[in-house]
Amino acid sequence: MPLMQIPQPGAYWPHFADLTSHTPAFDTLRTTAADLQAALTAGKLTSVQIVEEYHRSIVKHNAYLKAIYELAPGAVSRAREMDDLRSRGQVLGPLHGIPVVLKLLNAGMIVLGKASMSEMSFWKGSDIPCGWSAANGQAQSAYVYGGVDKDDSVAGHSSPLGSSTGSAIACSAGLTPIAIGTETFGSIVQPATRAALYSIKPTLGIVPGRGIVPVSDEYDTAGPFGKTPKDVADLLTVLVDPSKTNVPLGGYAAALGATWKDIKVGTLDPNIWTPDPAFVKYVEEVAEEIIDKTNVACRVTAGSAKWSYDHVSPLTNSQFTMPDGRSAIMAKLTFTFEECLNRYLADLKSSKIRTLAELVEYNKIRADTALPPENPSQSTLEASLHDPHDSAKLQEIETHLQSVAAKFMSIWDQYDIDIILAPGDSGVYNFSAACGFPMATLPVSTLDEYNGRPYGLVACAKPHGEEILMKTMDAWEESNPFGPRREPKAFLERRGMK
């Protein structure tokens, strides 16, 4: 049931009177999944009430944010089922009866709807802004005054980033308490950073990937978004396959309660690890603030850690550049995308499109909607379609990536550290893709004197280091020198709240 269309018979859809006369049962913007679970346990709320409250929030605010593409018509019915189970003493876990965008049904969760995204996981065409799709238009950050600037770069400071754009926006704006996104290289940690959220991009291979529209079967993974480490921990516990990794007894929430004294830290130099100006337009005042506060955050953290080392890696993203000038990661994805997508499309039960070639042709035939004048490109899809499948070239790419990965992975053992802290906009996610290691986001602050957009840190751990990342997020939440996680002032003003 697409948003703003007539709902299917029997599906819940708030009436306008509900939106204007209803007294909210709780504040969707500030309430966490753990808060909701406590209220459910105490009998102060039902899952039906919770779902209806988020429906109201979506209908009120999604026309601007465009964070949700589609509502799930069975959410209220599912909520009643979860309330019935609870009344009979059956609680399936800490997320029983809690709504989520996009999934899961096991663990008693309730699907609210599908989040919007950067089209084709940002693998459609050049110069298309993050968060835009032909199906849903341009998603907007809850933090940025004035929304996406049409004159900004593709991932500039007004951008919500992506490709899991809607998941991050929805969670930060109170359209859902928690959310799930997917990442190939940066698509969880980038939008999470721009939404002041905690998140984890898990170790590659520990989260089942069936059902993810692929960019790369090798690099794709799903991961959680939340406003607190506790919410991220509970959702991550549900997402991972425990046979593929070592989940702490009691789930990842059992790792909470750590301090920096339990963690060995290395940092990357924020003066070197800066975003590509072609991707994120350089603005001097913004760069200075982010570098300054990132240095402060790293110093404070390192000073409290078990031990620490500054600037542990001389590497930068230029390491990925091959002799022909291409990024090795982009070259590999271009080489392998067609095969991955064709396999996914062939497995669908009902689809008229079964290959990348058919998708490209479909877009051309329906160019008025699929390739509209404001964003008419599908150059990335076409490049993937026409890339010569040269096995010798692929081996050259693989060898280059393995060399870069080995250099970065040596840092942990060289310095005997648990985590590496990097600026959130640094592009360290490219190394995560190449190496397969997990990352977590740590909200730092917001650009209050510029446009309100958040910025943060990314913590990297060795593969299967999700437990130490949970400890890191928890320690950060308690010690952020710039105060608690920032709320979206721009969105609060739109809502008429303080």
Image (cartoon, rainbow, N blue to C red):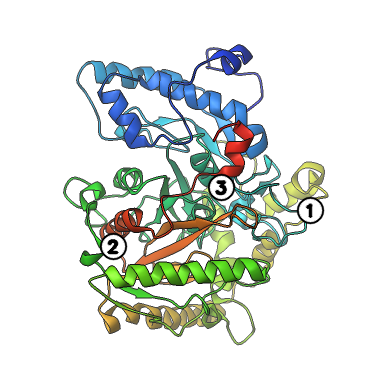
Mark 1 vs 2: CB contact within 8 A:
no
Compute the Cα span from label 1 to label 3: 23 Å
Rendered view: 159 above or below 169:
below
Q: Could you tell whether 154 is left or right of 256 in the image?
A: right
Q: Looking at the picture, which amino acid does disc 3 mark?
A: Leu
Rendered view: 67 above or below 371:
above
Compute the Cα span from label 1 to label 2: 41 Å
**In the rendering, which numbered label is found on residue 345?**
3
In this figure, which residue is indicated by the disc labeled 2? 464
| Residue drawn at (52%, 23%) of the image | 73
Q: Residues within 10 Å of mark 3 (few under 14, many from 20)?
A: some
Instruction: Specify the quadrant of the image occupied by residue 71.
Output: top right
SS at badge 2: loop
Q: Residues within 10 Å of mark 1 (few under 14, many from 20)?
A: many
Q: Nearer the viewer, mark 2 or mark 3?
A: 2
Compute the Cα span from label 2 to label 3: 31 Å
SS at badge 3: helix
Rendered view: 494 above or below 207:
above
Q: Nearer the viewer, mark 1 or mark 2?
A: 2
SS at badge 1: loop
Counting residues from the N terminus, which is met first, the one under dot 1 or under dot 2? 1
In this figure, which residue is indicated by the disc labeled 1? 376
